[in-house]
Amino acid sequence: MGSVKYTELGAFLRSRRDRIRPADVGLPSGPRRRVSGLRRDEVAQLAGASVDYYNELERGAGSQPSEQMIAALSRALRLTADERDYLYRLADRPVPVHSAPAAHVHPGMLDLLTRLTSTPAQVITDLHVTLVQNPLAVALLGDHSGLRGPRASFVHRWFTDPDSRRLYPEADHEGQSRAFVADLRAAVARRSAKDTEARSMIDSLLGTSSEFAALWADHDVAFRRDDRKRLQHPALGLIEVNCLNLFSEDGRQRLLWFTPAVGADSASLLDLLAVIGTQEMAGPAR
């Protein structure tokens, strides 16, 4: 890089970093911090980038950031829609259409997620792409931040990657498959007929998964709302939870949070998540 735009991009990133308090993104404040806002390494961590790469961006140097990196930085820095669009333009990348839910986390949902510090929670799209997770969700479900392309959708992974199913007991797999397909059909119906993201995903699954193709042909349709799930954690074993959903007004994003199921011995297990953290999670799943 090196143009005037990229110099401004670095200055803009610094200004947005300075305004965020660590507590806003679930990080400890600590008495020895030299800056009131986030440190560069913290922004890099939140965006899934290397510290060296992020340092280069703030200096207005290095390579042109990808669209995925701009989206990740926008989420990490809590940018508004206008600020996000500005960052795309500074990076000489096409500004995503505002109907694309993965481009920007709904601000209200992001605010609620920040306040949910004692229960696993995450924001996903209607195609089950994880946009942001709190630390307890990572500990329970795995870290989804590095997933790109079709694999970013848990529904896609469910039907194409057998390892993704380890999160649920095998006895629950058939029911989960049916629920995912019915939910996907409901989500697609709410989208524009010209939407290419959903169509591309469905075509891919129809061509690669006979199970998905058979279930899709049944034409079942039902949004997943409040759900009772049995989750298989690699360290804690079976955890039975209530999965609660809050939908955005257009239905394109959902805030999910997990609470102990009534009648199950899950409360103490969820409490242990904060102690165990992500050390026992083998990989991303939901």
Image (cartoon, grey):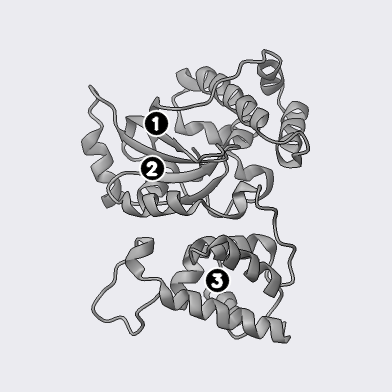
Q: Which residue is mark 2?
A: 140
Name the residue located 65 percent from the left edge and 85 percent from the top edge.
Answer: 7
How far apart are the two marked residues, 2 and 3, measured between alpha carbons?
25 Å
Q: Is residue 34 left or right of residue 80?
A: left
Label 2: state its secondary structure. Answer: helix
Q: Secondary structure at mark 3?
A: loop
Does 156 sit above or below residue 222?
Answer: below
Q: Amino acid at mark 3?
A: Ser
Look at mark 3 in the image and give the residue it sits on.
50
Q: Is residue 209 left or right of residue 59?
A: right
Residue 52 locus on image (x, y percent): 56, 78
**What type is the residue that disc 2 sits on?**
Leu
Q: Earlier in the sequence, mark 2 or mark 3?
A: 3
Q: Label 3 vs label 1: CA separation?
A: 32 Å
> What residue is drawn where x is 78% and y is 38%?
194
In the rendered image, which quarter is residue 60 located in?
Answer: bottom right
- Please, what is the three-letter code of the amino acid marked with disc 1? Leu
Q: Which residue is mark 1?
A: 231
> Residue 49 placed where, x, y %?
56, 67
**Residue at position x 48%, y 52% in the image:** 132
In the rendered image, residue 182, in percent from the top left (x then y), is placed at 59, 22
